[in-house]
Image (cartoon, coloured by chain):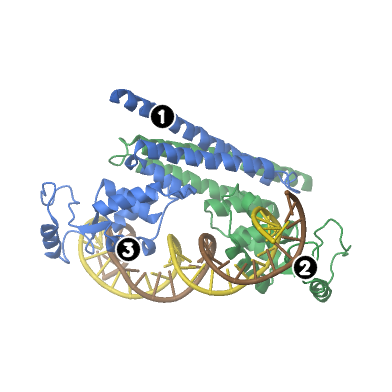
Chain colours: A blue, B green, C brown, D yellow
Amino acid sequence: MLELAILGLLREQELHGYELKKRIADLGGNRLAISFGSLYPALARLEALGSVKAVEAHVAPVSIPMTGSLAGEAAAFLRKRRPPVERTGRARKVYGITERGEQHLNDLLADPSLDDKAFHLKVAFCRYLPPAGRLELFERRRAQLTGQLAGAHTSTRRRGEQRDSYLRSLREHDTESIQHDIAWLDRLIASERADHGQAQEEKS
Amino acid sequence: MLELAILGLLREQELHGYELKKRIADLGGNRLAISFGSLYPALARLEALGSVKAVEAHVAPVSIPMTGSLAGEAAAFLRKRRPPVERTGRARKVYGITERGEQHLNDLLADPSLDDKAFHLKVAFCRYLPPAGRLELFERRRAQLTGQLAGAHTSTRRRGEQRDSYLRSLREHDTESIQHDIAWLDRLIASERADHGQAQEEKS
DNA sequence: GTCATCATGTAAGCCGTTACATGATTGC
DNA sequence: GCAATCATGTAACGGCTTACATGATGAC
């Protein structure tokens, strides 16, 4: 979950831990906020796995031109030349995603777990999935939600349930929320299929 | 969280572990499902704390009349008299809430944490809260959600954000969902205030 | 000169999970 | 007789949190 968020964000741009934390938090209106105590060890883990590696910061708009790719040795040299005292607080470690990391991200996006948080993240990064993978993701989630809706129907009306207006209101609101989610998924699915159809046409 | 669910359910009726698990799961359309590996230790913990105690099952509509309180010794005796071979699978341990447990439940309902799951459970059992506590619960949640909405406004429009239609759609849908939640809370709050007003009138 | 913010990390602990072990009852 | 379901528990492990430790920079 955390790793999905990290890799997804790094895939777009190199970032250091502190910044990653902020981005992850606002990736889901604070619902996905995580602590440093889990972020830094996660980064270390990903680095050990080779999914991520520390790189020189070309963070400030222009610090050293750096025309695109500047291989590992040079980057490492530059990083070591200024351990303390720069222009920033305690030395930042800027991370970038590796090729292995991109594969790792693909794996995480494909994995079948679909709890609320995981699904949110997967949608946030589903642009990195092939169209078929996206469609499958949306449809799996849809099936899951319709299942929950069916469950709500049959489970309703236990003793008490009827008398307690709060519980009744809660269930009603839940049902509406799920239906709202399903309607949204249906729009996503429809537009995905439309794109797919278009792509097919262009091929022929 | 687990303890809140257990105490909330036991406050209404005595139940055994296996049944509790099912009830907890459908208290939130499977979003709150928990495993036995956390349920049974939690029950043991609550029993050790004196919030809950094992009682004789008067589970089948009428088994033994049991006029109200029948103290621990007798209950234990009855329970031990039939370890295997009854009418049920492996001997069930039926739990009931104690007075300490009711206090414990009140404490848990009052505690300030308000993540999605905790809030869901608190609403499910808010009938056990005094009217003022309910109102406070709803309003704290409302404030939290409006905060998230404000955050979404300012954080939008990072690089990429604009171009990625999935991320845009996700944020849009999130915003709608939160607004839907707030509207629901507003109805709850209004009706709570109406009840409160009525209660006040009746007093005078 | 002191406070807020930026920045990285470690250690202890909580709360939950999966996997395993056990066994009785019911229905086919 | 065998599988599904009911029923209770333990052990190992995972992922995240809080609290702590450290320190630099910039603003006032």
* Local crowd size for mark 2, using a 10 Å CA cut-off: few (<14), some (14–19), many (≥20): many
The three-letter code of the residue at mark 2 reads Val
Q: Position of residue D27 (x, y in %)?
A: 25, 55
- Residue in front for this viewpoint, A126 or A198: A198
Judged from the image, the secondary structure of the residue bearing numbered disc 3 is: helix
- Residue B74 is situated, as x and y percent measured from the top left of the image, at 84, 74
Q: Quadrant of the N terminus of chain A?
A: bottom left
Q: State which chain disc 3 sits on.
A: A
Disc 3 or disc 1, which is closer to the eye?
Answer: 1
Of circles 1 and 2, which is in front?
Answer: 1
Whether labels 1 and 2 share one chain: no
Q: Which mark is residue B55?
A: 2
Q: Are marks 2 and 3 on the same chain?
A: no
Residue under pointer 3: A45
Tell me the residue at 45%/37% (across/down).
Answer: B173
Which image quadrant for residue B157? top left
Asked if one can make out residue B64 in the rendered structure from this viewpoint, the answer is: yes
Q: Badge 3 local density, few (<14 within 10 Å), some, or many (20+)?
A: some
- The chain that hosts pointer 1 is A
- Image-based side of B61 in relation to C13, left or right: right
Query: What residue is shown with label 1?
Result: A193
Corner quadrant of residue B149: top left
Instruction: Point out the image quarter for the C terminus of chain A.
Output: top left
The disc, 3 or 1, on the residue closer to the chain's N-terminal end is: 3
At label 1, the amino acid type is: Arg
